[in-house]
Image (cartoon, rainbow, N blue to C red):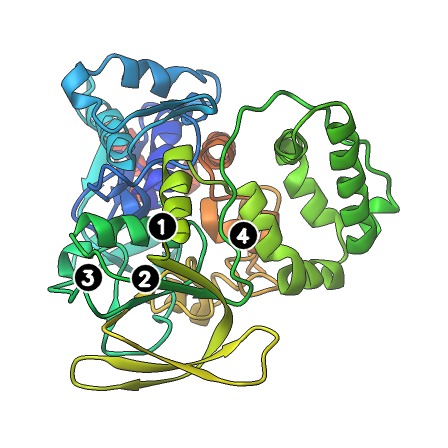
Amino acid sequence: MNPVIAVVGAGFSGSMAALHLLAALPRSWSVLLCEKAGSFGRGLAYGTEAPAHLLNLRAANMSAYPERPEHFATWLGGLPEDERAGVAVTPAGTFAPRALYGRYLGDLLTEAVVAEGTPRLHLVNDAVTDLVPGADGYSLRTEGGASYAVAGVVLAMGNLTGPGAPPSRHRLDPWRPEEFGRLHPDRPVLVVGTGLTMVDAVASLRGRGFPGRIVALSRRGLVPNVHAPTKPWPVPDLTAADLASLTRLTRRIRAEIAAAGRSGRDWRDVIDALRPVIGYLWRSLPRPERARFLRHLRPFWDVHRHRAAPPAAEAIAREIAAGTLDVRAGRILAIADGPGEAVVTIRPRGGTTDETLTVQGIVDATGIGRIDETGDPLLRRLVVRGLARPDAFGLGLAAGDDYRLHAGRPDRLWTLGPLLRGTVWECVAVPDIRSQAAEVAALVAAEVDRLPAGRAHPSERTRKASR
């Protein structure tokens, strides 16, 4: 095999990293794309087959390539009519089922694998469990016992799963609705979390035929806002003083929204205008101010920034109006598991009297896990070995502006996507990740170009010696 850069994870982050690396690296280099799940290109986000699980971004914003913004919309429009079932055309834009987007990504990877010439993209369907440093790179080792010599690695594992909250033997995985089992229509189900994962969980429960009551609980009881038609709005002109204080920055953005309202515009225009500078805003805020954001403002930001597709939001609104979905603010104090049910003790937000709720199942919709909660063996070993360290808030991995891991040594380890949450904050949406993938690929290619001939990957030295 040619000298190799490995990508760990083949959801959107890893798939984009692999495709951009193929374009940026010398043709004598290959890419090893490793994925522990059963399929490539899908990950948790796009592995669902439920037609009601829609993308949370318009199709026009979902191209895999920053320089070709219409790529996905064109691909979607080229499908036969009977394969476009579930595509929702709304005044706010076109929203496709996530399963179709997973198929789109799979098609891109297939094209890369079967491209003419010497194969350069190699798929490894196995879990990566360790990276052992060597003189010229790393020995990448998998759960199945395989070992690969690689010159560098891009960590692209996507959203981390937490330890499973809350702990209960009646917990249901929102990403595996086929394992829900038989649910009794006269006994409620509790969904812990009220964000976008809750929206999907409700759709999954209804899709599995459960007609009963659903209770959704989070600390503040906030549900995602809905997408609406938007127009471009100029990026707010923020001062150094605005960027030094979370309170002042919040007031400044609210003033901008008020100004938009006076002009007959929508608050969404202003929030969307912030997208190109969110990383800059996050880095500019002093660390204590970022910590304040995480403690107090994050839920409010999330429901405004990460909005639901209109059909999904309308379905939730109908459920709430009908009383079949009860969205509540509060926290869980205790869970007592019984043979066929769980008794959950809840403290309502702002209340002093605890309540109990008896449910047949508890859906964990709390969302993304933290790096210090992960059970991923690779990440844990990298941290223990000193090759990686958590960011300042324990959300993901510490990395520099060049996406290289901060571990006190110049290793050829990069990361992108949700693992950068604590570093750049906004890194979970397709427009953010695809740009990161292109930048990472360019930086890795520049690193490869700087490698002296004597320090090339072992297989590269062997190939040169055989000439």
The x and y percentages for residue 440 are 49, 36
Along the horizontal axis of the image, is 433 left or right of 212? right
Along the horizontal axis of the image, is 208 left or right of 192? left
**Are the two marked residues, 1 and 2, in contact with CB atoms closer than 8 angstroms?**
yes
Q: CA distance from mark 4 to mark 3?
A: 27 Å
**Are the two marked residues, 4 and 3, in contact with CB atoms closer than 8 angstroms?**
no
Q: Secondary structure at mark 3?
A: loop
The x and y percentages for residue 290 are 69, 58
Q: Which residue is mark 4?
A: 421
For residue 120, above or below residue 364: above
- Mark 1 closeness class: few <14, some 14–19, many ≥20 residues within 10 Å: some
- Mark 3 closeness class: few <14, some 14–19, many ≥20 residues within 10 Å: few
Question: Residue 67's mark?
Answer: none
* Type of amino acid at the residue the image marks with label 4: Arg
Question: Residue 214's mark?
Answer: 2
Kindly give the residue lying farthest to the left in the view shown. 182
Residue at point 54% right, 48% down? 303
Depth order, front residue of 49/188: 188
Q: Which residue is mark 1?
A: 319
Residue at point 49% right, 38% down? 226
The x and y percentages for residue 316 are 39, 47
* Type of amino acid at the residue the image marks with label 1: Glu
**Are the two marked residues, 2 and 4, in contact with CB atoms closer than 8 angstroms?**
no
- Mark 2 closeness class: few <14, some 14–19, many ≥20 residues within 10 Å: many
Q: CA distance from mark 1 to mark 3?
A: 44 Å
Q: CA distance from mark 3 to mark 2?
A: 39 Å
* Type of amino acid at the residue the image marks with label 2: Ile
Of labels 1 and 2, earlier in sequence is 2
